[in-house]
Amino acid sequence: MTGLVLENLSMRFDLPNGTSVQALKDVSLDLAAGELLSVLGPSGCGKTTLLNIVAGFLAPTEGRVLLNGHAVTGPAAERGMVFQQGALFEWMDVRANVSFGPRMAGKRERDWGAHVDHLLDVVGLREFKEKAVYELSGGMQQRVALARCLANDPDVILMDEPLGALDALTREKMQSLVLKLWKETGKTIILITHSVEEALLLGERLLVMAPRPGRIHKEYRLPFADLGVGEDLRAVKKHPDFAATREEILGMIWNMEEEIMGRTEAAQ
């Protein structure tokens, strides 16, 4: 059995004052190996909580996560995480950051050196391999974070708003890189984003989450990720179905936000 399975995941956070917050409720999903999933939803709908459960950082209140038939019980190298801020080691150079995982696993450079150098080539950072992280731009730092994740050869790559802090042009270049890496590596990818446009471009499958308690409101299967591999993403955005789907999802999330605001005002 290969792939990622989420079975009836629920997550409740118990607060010190005796109350609780139901962040997720009965979330189920089957994700085949090599699929690219983007996840959207209004603020507070449990997107990051869901990602942290899959990563093994949180244990769900109910339900379970299976990867390749085995239960996820904690963090492991088979699941790599790329954060919004790269979470890099600033005192190390680029190559040392990318090779951190294999080195911590006790592998010798002869076992990981060629692979790390190949990854630096793929993300366009070979000539910067001896640079300190703080010398790099935000986009370049995110390239380091992607390469570091891939150096561990995970089955699943989890991305929590990895491009959210980048300027528009750099973000578009990084979106193209994500699609390139997805096709070349065959990795399963789950990407959390607040950008409807980005979710459409990068999601072979797209989930729209409902407001708290977080649930799957609607799922889309889209052609745009495949169309965008090796192509100008601005051309993909001109696809006749792109604008219509974007407006449909924007309207959906707008209505959810209005509902949340209405509930907040009524409680005051």
Image (tube, helix red, strand yellow):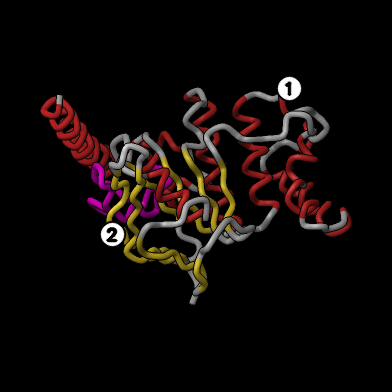
Residue at image mark 2: 26
Which badge, 1 or 2, is on the more N-terminal residue?
2
In the image, residue 161 lies at what x, y percent? Answer: 47, 37
Q: Position of residue 23 (x, y in %)?
A: 32, 46
Number of labels in the image equals 2
Q: Residue 224 at what x, y percent from top left? A: 38, 48
| Mark 2 nearby-residue class (10 Å; few <14, some 14–19, many ≥20) | some
Q: Residue at x 28, y 41 (%)?
A: 19
Secondary element at tag 2: strand
Looking at the image, which is closer to me, 62 or 171? Answer: 62
Region of the chain picked out in magenta, as a range: 201-224
Corner quadrant of residue 244:
top left
Q: Residue at x 40, y 38 (%)?
A: 193
Question: Spatial distance from mark 1 to mark 2, Cα to Cα?
Answer: 45 Å
**129 within the magenta span:** no
Residue at the disc numbered 1? 135
> Looking at the image, which is closer to me, 110 or 47?
47
Compared with residue 119, is residue 169 higher up or lower down, i.e. above or below? above
